[in-house]
Image (cartoon, rainbow, N blue to C red):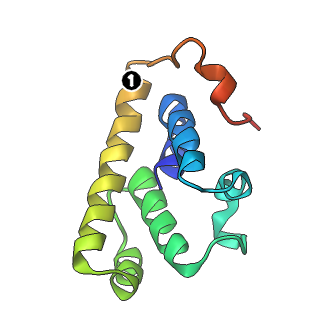
Amino acid sequence: MIVRSGQLLAAEYEWKHHWVIAKEEGVSEEKLQALAHWQTNALFDADERAVLALADDTAAGTGASKATMLQLAERFSNEHVTEFVVTASFYAGVARIVNSFDVPLEPGFESMTPRDD
């Protein structure tokens, strides 16, 4: 969700840092490379699609759509939905902050970053 938010908001610092974290947590390179087309890619299950829809909504709009909130509510507890919405909203804000201040990647970090294709 965070990688997708950074990707949509062109926040290189957020996107690349969380790409590395996602891989460390077991997300496959294949899934990360497919994030731009998650809606049509069979790699993502229904739970992941609901959370990625939230990332898209909060990055591109004013918040989660009713359809996304319904999807989340059908799949997760109220506590988890709240956590997802807060996290997605926070990282959409972080992306706007790092972009506004043009936060650079740390020296030496470049070797740990994903491809820029």
Residue 86 left/right relative to 100 = left
Question: x and y percent of residue 96 in the render?
Answer: 38, 34
Which residue is depicted at the point 32% across and 41% down?
Answer: 93
Give the vertical position of 99 relative to 8 (above or below): above
Which residue is depicted at the point 70% across and 70% down?
Answer: 43
Residue 115 left/right relative to 26 = right
Q: Residue furthest bottom?
A: 74
Question: x and y percent of residue 75 in the render?
Answer: 40, 84
Tag count: 1
Residue topped by disc 1: 100
Q: Amino acid at mark 1?
A: Ser
Question: x and y percent of residue 99 in the render?
Answer: 44, 27
Residue 24 left/right relative to 63 = right
Q: Quadrant of the C terminus?
A: top right
Residue 16 left/right relative to 80 = right
Describe the element under mark 1 as helix, strand or loop: helix
